[in-house]
Image: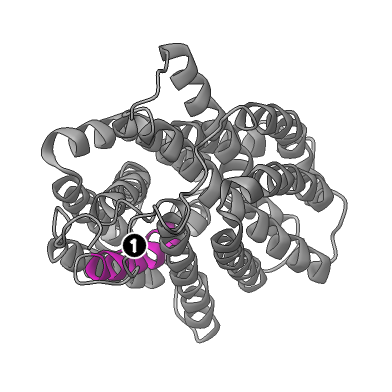
Amino acid sequence: MMLPVSTRQILQALLAGSVALVVVHSLGRFAFTPLLPYLLDDGLFTLHQGAQLATWNYIGYLCGALLALAVYRPERLRIALPCALLLNALIILAQGFTSDYLALLALRLANGISNGLVFVLAPALVLEWLAERQRAQLSGLVYMGFAAGLLLAGWLADLPSAWLSGASRWWPVAAVALPLALFSAWQLSKLHVRPHAEPSTRPPATPLFDRASTPLFLSYAGAGLGYILPMTFLPTLAQAQLPAGHSLVSGAWRWTAVACLLSIPLWNSLGARLGDRRALLGTYLLQAVGCAAPLLWPGSLGILLCAVLVGGTFTGSVLLTQRLARTLQPHQGPRLSAALIALYGGAQLAGPWLAGLWIQHGGSLEQSFAFGALAILWALIWSWLTPAHSTHSTGA
């Protein structure tokens, strides 16, 4: 049964989820990327240690996504989601008051755990709320906030850079994250979804891994490994490849953010019109070129192509995969979303680890981007093998 809904309610739901992603993913997680060159110049840690900080953040992200499997039911979600959201903002603030490397490792791990929880639960809650009202095709727009937040993170890193140093560079990020977290937690508390059916009336469960979904899971693993290298190290790579003062040294991240922001409604619309699977193939094709661009065309062209093509596709890959998965297994709901994101988070661990290992053994940062390009090609192949619709009947 379709529940009544107004345009204002839909916008409020999308805003609530979007702001949550701004806090935990744009500011809590990816503000680290534009801040990294400054923190390296300040001597807070080395490039290898920076890669380790990123790795521990992704370990936390994986743990948080797995934890979401245990708290996805509405009665638990209503407590876990706002707590994780507010905790993430407080961790951002805490990072601004320590220069101890081990303390930073612990904070980045905790940041990842709370991020993983929110990144699963907030979009899943909005998707389920919209699906109950026959508006699931709008669900991809929840990621608009994350994209806008990437741009915001770049500004918060660059604009006060001359006045701050070391750990204090996190202060502007925390000053924005805390009020946004409070606002989002309040708005998300207004979204109510129907409780899960009793076992006697619930449609028979299907395994998460079946002949329809397994290729999609394999594809998403490649996507997680592939996109994370440019999304973590692109500003640092720009600093290494380009002369001092070049506009792309600080501007590469802004190009990434703008491309991400503009592309989300495009991929959301293309998925609805052409089919999520076809649109997903397009994201991976362009993303593979973007990952390889700094290798193929070192310098400003490669950096710009990487920023635009990866920034303009990776969020599209996420929203299209989530929708396609729900099409293949419509009764799994947030559980399916949590499993996919846990896999995505686990695959991301390999990216910074491989980059750090390669650099430790004499390789260059740009050469490590080859791992990302190969992983995206893997994602493209398995997406091609994924069906566009469920291969079993509903309830089978």
Residue 204 horizontal/vertical position (percent) = 33, 62
| SS majority, magenta | helix
Q: Which residue is mark 1?
A: 223
Picture quadrant of residue 143: top left
Could you tell me which residue is drawn at 42 percent across and 13 percent down? 6
Residue 114 horizontal/vertical position (percent) = 67, 54
127 vs 335: above or below:
above
248 falls in the magenta region:
no
Label 1 sits on a secondary structure element that is: helix
Could you tell me which residue is drawn at 51 percent across and 53 percent down? 239
Residue 255 horizontal/vertical position (percent) = 41, 37
Residue 284 seen anywhere in this rendered image of the structure: yes
Report the span colored magenta: 213-230
* Left or right, residue 53 beside residue 311: right
Specify the color scheme: one colour
Quadrant location of the C terminus?
bottom left
* Left or right, residue 28 beside residue 307: right
Q: Amino acid at mark 1?
A: Ala
Could you tell me which residue is drawn at 41 percent across and 13 percent down? 7
Query: Tag count in the figure?
Result: 1
